Image: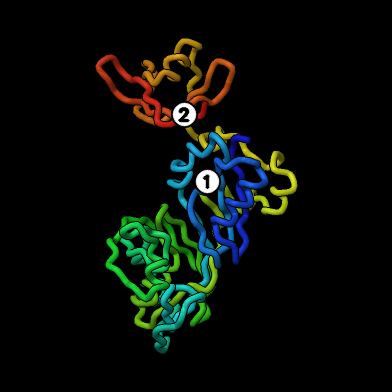
């Protein structure tokens, strides 16, 4: 089996456990997810199978949309409701103040990963150190919040939608908004509604996938549906398979999905300007 399945991960399950279930159902070890969802969160978790694992990095880079609920007035060590409350403060902010502060987080920002995260530090996951009572300095990481829109504000509870780049921690966003408001805050629920083209509407329950895996696997090329397509000759395919570049004089400096004469996806390539014009350099193969 080669392709992608858009799993709806239930709350209470780790992303690793979801991958393990897909691996058993698909009967292959070549399986990988495209962005960790916290155990308490539910939602879209695209999982690549077989040759599609070569596309993981390109799916991870897609925009993600979340439905989040935040509670103001209390900060926790995990930045969500699963943690221990470490500080409580009265909430005096108004709906207008909440909206105004949230706007300050829209755009290209930096974010410090939480201690309870899967980020590596000297060979260990941060959450492993956190469970030992160890806190280490973390470097801020670039993230982008494209949009934050509020659905309901009933202080101290706030419900909003957020669209962001890869690597963004929504519970850290809740924590940071709470600190900016002066009352603290933490995430109480999280649903990932979309990861790129994979949405809530086209997701499949784990149980349904386990019952009939082949019925729910999408072809690899579906990931690159928005990219321009190039169909190559048999000779050009031979060159590609040998690691060589091919000339593409009509191309631009952009990415292309490259197909064989018979319509089989061969690779993802980048158009590069050379002395003789544009040529295609393979980024990752699917053969």
Q: Is residue 44 above or below residue 174?
A: above
Q: How many marks?
A: 2
Residue found 36% across the figure and 26% down from its top = 271
Residue sitting farthest toward the top: 235
Instruction: Tell whether 126 sits left or right of 18.
Output: left
Q: Which mark is residue 285?
A: 2
- Look at the image and tell me whether residue 265 can be seen: yes
SS class, disc 2: strand
Quarter of the image with the N terminus is top right
| Picture layout, residue 266 above or below residue 182 | above
Q: Which secondary structure, mark 1?
A: strand
Q: Position of residue 260 (x, y in %)?
A: 53, 19
What residue appears at the point 29 percent right and 23 percent down from the top-left corner?
273
Q: Nearer the viewer, residue 242 or 139?
A: 242
Give the class, few, some or many, for how many residues have Cα within 10 Å of label 2's Cα (few <14, many ≥20).
some
Mark earlier in primary sequence (2, 1): 1
Residue found at x 52% / y 26%: 287
Measuring from the top left, give residue 236's x and y in whole percent: 45, 14
Residue 249 relative to residue 2: left or right: left
Q: CA distance from mark 2 to mark 1?
A: 16 Å
Residue receiving disc 1: 32
């Amino acid at each position: 089996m080669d392709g992608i399945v858009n799993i709806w991960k239930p709350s209470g399950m780790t992303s690793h456990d979801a991958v393990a279930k897909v691996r058993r159902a698909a009967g292959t070890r070549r399986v990988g997810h495209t962005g960790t969802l916290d155990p308490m969160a539910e939602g879209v978790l695209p999982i690549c199978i077989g040759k599609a694992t070569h596309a993981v990095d390109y799916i991870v880079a897609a925009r993600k949309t979340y439905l989040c609920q935040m509670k103001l007035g209390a900060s926790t060590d995990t930045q969500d409701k699963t943690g221990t409350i470490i500080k409580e403060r009265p909430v005096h902010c108004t709906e207008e103040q909440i909206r105004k502060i949230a706007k300050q987080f829209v755009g290209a920002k930096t974010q410090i990963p939480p201690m309870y995260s899967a980020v590596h530090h000297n060979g260990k996951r941060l959450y492993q150190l956190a469970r030992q009572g160890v806190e280490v300095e973390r470097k801020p990481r670039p993230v982008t919040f494209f949009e934050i829109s509020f659905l309901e504000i009933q202080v101290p509870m706030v419900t909003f939608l957020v669209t962001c780049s890869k690597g963004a921690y929504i519970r850290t966003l809740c924590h940071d908004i709470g600190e900016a408001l002066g009352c603290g805050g933490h995430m109480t629920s999280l649903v990932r509604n979309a990861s790129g083209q994979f949405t809530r509407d086209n997701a499949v329950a784990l149980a349904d996938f386990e019952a009939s895996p082949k019925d729910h696997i999408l072809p690899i090329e579906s990931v690159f549906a928005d990219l321009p397509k190039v169909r190559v000759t048999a000779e050009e395919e031979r060159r590609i398979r040998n690691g060589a570049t091919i000339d593409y004089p009509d191309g631009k400096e952009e990415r292309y999905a490259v197909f064989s004469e018979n319509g089989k996806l061969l690779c993802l390539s980048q158009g590069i300007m050379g002395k003789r014009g544009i040529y295609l350099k393979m980024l990752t193969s699917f053969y």
